[in-house]
Every structure is written in structure tokens, then in C-alpha cells.
Image (cartoon, helix red, strand yellow):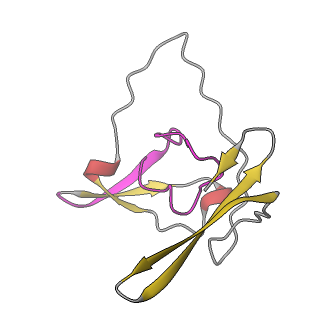
């Protein structure tokens, strides 16, 4: 399942696929209803066929799911560690301020 990145975005390079889910029913020719785990119940459970991939079983393939806590408003707790850089650009008479923020010291995740 792809496309859930906007709701579950813990890391800058998040997983492309989030796990194995059972297809409950076919809604339309291009839409499927998926049985989601309890931690993802606040996501809409109908997905376009382009967001799904067929699972090809392999005996040595072990999947591990991250324990993600998603709130009702689809937000996560993220507090900045420190501000790395501040720039101001002039664009058509406006000043646009950009700030580079370090979010995680361990992984060096920054935006």
C-alpha cells in the first residue's frame, strides 16, 4: 500500500510498502476495500488499484510492521532540535523566509 505517506511520515525516507492487508471486497473495477490494522483505523480503507501491489510469497521473506500511533487529526509529535540556517529571498517585492530545521539528531533528518 503506497500513498499513506502523508498520514504516516515518521522518517524522511519512509517505506514504500506498509504491509500485508486482506482485501475485503472489490468496490469498483479500480477500487478495493482493505482490512486495516487497529493502529490505522482512522485512514480511509478504500484504495485505488494503483496503490496496491500483489504479494508474491517467499519462505525467507519476513515482514516487520512499525508501531505507528496516528491521531484522529492525522498529526504526529515532532519537535525541532535546532535551527540550522535562515535565508531570506526577495521575489517580486515580497520577502520569503526559509528556515532549515534539524528534527532528529540521530538520523540527521532535516527540512
Q: Position of residue 60 (x, y in %)?
A: 55, 10
Q: Position of residue 104 (x, y in %)?
A: 77, 48
Q: Residue at image x 70%, y 71%? A: 71
Q: Residue at image x 70%, y 52%? A: 68
Q: Residue at image x 46%, y 14%? A: 58
17 up-or-down from 99: above or below: above
Which one is nearer the viewer's eye here, 27 or 9?
9
Q: Quadrant of residue 65?
A: top right
Q: Is residue 57 left or right of residue 11?
A: left
Label total for image: 0
Q: Is residue 7 left or right of residue 38?
A: left
Q: Is residue 67 left or right of residue 13?
A: right
What's the magenta region? 1-29
79 up-or-down from 58: above or below: below
Q: Residue at image x 53%, y 66%? A: 43
Q: Main secondary structure of the magenta part?
A: loop
Q: Position of residue 39 (x, y in %)?
A: 68, 58
Q: Quadrant of the C terminus?
A: bottom right
Which one is nearer the viewer's eye here, 27 or 109?
109
Tell me, yes or no, whether the highlighted magenta stretch contains residue 12.
yes
Q: Residue furthest left?
A: 29
Amino acid at each position: 500500500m503506497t500513498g499513506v505517506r502523508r498520514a504516516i511520515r515518521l522518517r524522511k525516507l519512509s517505506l514504500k510498502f506498509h504491509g500485508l492487508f486482506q482485501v475485503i471486497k472489490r468496490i469498483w473495477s479500480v477500487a478495493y476495500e482493505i482490512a486495516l490494522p487497529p493502529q490505522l483505523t482512522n485512514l480511509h480503507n478504500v484504495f485505488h488499484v494503483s496503490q496496491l501491489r500483489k504479494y508474491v510469497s517467499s519462505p525467507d521473506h519476513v515482514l516487520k510492521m512499525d508501531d505507528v500511533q496516528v491521531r484522529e487529526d492525522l498529526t504526529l509529535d515532532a519537535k525541532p532540535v535546532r535551527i540550522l540556517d535562515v535565508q531570506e529571498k526577495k521575489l517580486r517585492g515580497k520577502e520569503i523566509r526559509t528556515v532549515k530545521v534539524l528534527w532528529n539528531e540521530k538520523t540527521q533528518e532535516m527540512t
